[in-house]
Image (tube, rainbow, N blue to C red):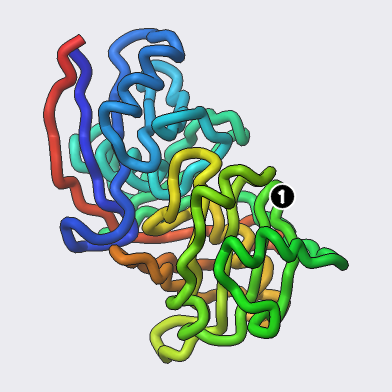
Amino acid sequence: MMEIFQVDSFTTEAFRGNPAGVCILDEHHDDRLLRKIAMEMAVSETAFISLENMSLRWFTPRVEVELCGHATLATAWVLYCKGIIRENQLVKFNTRSGELTVRVKDGYVEMDFPLIKVEQRSKLDGTKTALLGINEHNIVFYGNAGEKDFFEVESVETLRNIRPDFSGLSNLPGRGIVVTSKSNDTRYDFFSRYFAPWVGVNEDPVTGSTHCALAYYWNKKFNRVKMAGYQASERGGVVIIKIVDHKRVKLSGNATIVIEGKILI
């Protein structure tokens, strides 16, 4: 038996934010079993943590991913609630993206991630843009953040009205699409949405890892190192950002455990 949890990340309310599975491994298990557990959990990502060496891995229902912010946050919150880590303790996770550090303080989980550079592209992919559901005249910026497409659109209204053709998009080459806009709400600096049908997640509710790129992009436009982003999915969630040394970004958010149990295998 293994302990397993479902946690809503980047929110203090159940059934909002981004749900993640968290599984505490009691021993080594092969990747096929981890993928099956992720499929059974049926959320965008499930985190698997080994307490022996603090190895942390993330699986979607289809594939293993290099980095996942909301499932990292969820893992830290579970370990804190179970008394495995303490308030303000610096915790180091060993991951495929290198060492990631987290700290729980005043009800928030603070994660230290690398900034992801956003680079402009000279040519717009018209087919992908059409399937995404954006009029080219509404695009302020088009580029990439690593393997992901990155768009800024002219308004929050345009952002909220996007209705992608996920079937069509999944037939094109791609990894994920970040769409963002300047905020029209004084509580936040920018809004965003994230689509990734290529890995089985049509729209992610709140995406920690994309905020590594969003922090880079909006810092260049606003010249601010502290910002708040709202991800405007149906569930919605808030990510607090602090850029450190122009190379790292601290992402902070709340979490709440909604399911706790054991998986019988």
Looking at the image, residue 170 sits to the left or right of residue 89; the answer is: right
Mark 1, secondary structure of its residue: loop
User: The C terminus lies in which quarter of the figure?
Assistant: top left
Residue sticking out furthest to the right: 122
x then y, percent, for residue 68: 48, 43
User: The N terminus lies in which quarter of the figure?
Assistant: top left
* Among the 4 quarters of the image, the one containing residue 96: top right
Name the residue located 28 percent from the left edge and 42 percent from the top edge.
Answer: 86
- Of residue 192 and residue 248, the one placed in the foreground of this image is 192
Residue 212 against residue 130 in the figure, above or below: above
x then y, percent, for residue 235: 29, 63
Looking at the image, residue 52 sits to the left or right of residue 42; the answer is: right
Name the residue located 87 percent from the left edge and 67 percent from the top edge.
Answer: 122
- Of residue 1 and residue 54, the one placed in the foreground of this image is 1
Q: How many marks?
A: 1
Name the residue located 18 percent from the left edge and 62 percent from the top edge.
Answer: 13
Looking at the image, residue 85 sits to the left or right of residue 156; the answer is: left
Q: Is residue 137 visible?
A: yes
x then y, percent, for residue 57: 46, 28
Q: Tell me if mark 1 has few (under 14), some (14-19) or many (20+) residues whose alpha carbon lies within 10 angstroms of its own.
A: some
Q: Amino acid at mark 1?
A: Gly
**Residue where numbered disc 1 is placed:** 146
- Of residue 105 and residue 40, the one placed in the foreground of this image is 40
Residue 60 against residue 9 in the figure, above or below: above
x then y, percent, for residue 249: 59, 59
